[in-house]
Image: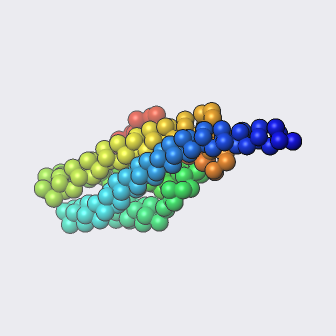
Amino acid sequence: MKKTVLAIVGILALLVVFSSCGYNGMVKLDEDVKAKWNQVETQYQRRSDLIPNLVNTVKGAAKFEQSTLTQVTEARAKATQVTIDPDKLTPENIEKYQAAQGQVSQALGRLLMVTENYPELKATEQFRDVSAELAGTENRIAVARKDFNEAVQTYNTKVRSFPNNITAGIFGFSQKAGFKAEAGADKAPKVEF
């Protein structure tokens, strides 16, 4: 009886030793994923904040297609309503967020394509400045998404590796979802005037 109790205590002690190292590492990586997610949201918010400036610049400089402006404004409004709790980064939630942001990207693409018909608009300093800010923001979004996906990969590797997978199961650390390419992203956009 004493040997059985000692064996159980020994096994529990080993589990505690193994789990404490893995647990702390998983907490650190989990927090890194959350921080990277916050950067993704920050960059999308930056884009969302620039859109009214772009729309107002275009409105003021051209007799513009109202439906395109409306689509951009509506897509921005929908995208700002979709948020994700960093503790709930499931594939479904990431997909919803990505779909809302994809609608903004499509609407902005249409807006910028239609502005090609207004050479006086492209020549205005304000339009150039806002367009440059928007292009820079799109690059920042790409970098933030890449950094987030790398953090998710590191976290998921830790959570799935032995013996950390045991610790992860005990303490409720589960895999997180990253960004995936949108459907049709492998094809170049068609630009027509």
Q: Is residue 160 above or below residue 30?
A: above
Which quadrant of the view contains residue 164?
top right
Residue 66 showing in the rendered view: yes
Residue 17, horizontal then vertical, whole percent = 60, 40
How many tags in the picture? 0
Residue occupying image coordinates x 31% and y 47%: 140
Residue 151, horizontal then vertical, whole percent = 45, 41
Residue occupying image coordinates x 63% and y 33%: 162
Residue 180 showing in the rendered view: no
Residue 109, horizontal then vertical, whole percent = 35, 49
Q: Nearer the viewer, residue 11 or 85?
A: 11
Using residue 59 as the reference point, say whether residue 13 is left or right of it. right
Q: Is residue 106 above or below residue 165?
A: below
Quarter of the C terminus within the rendering: top left
Residue 75, horizontal then vertical, whole percent = 43, 61
Q: Nearer the viewer, residue 74 or 149?
A: 149
Quarter of the N terminus within the rendering: top right
Residue occupying image coordinates x 55% and y 37%: 158
Residue occupying image coordinates x 47% and y 47%: 28
Q: Nearer the viewer, residue 85 or 120?
A: 85
- Applied colour scheme: rainbow
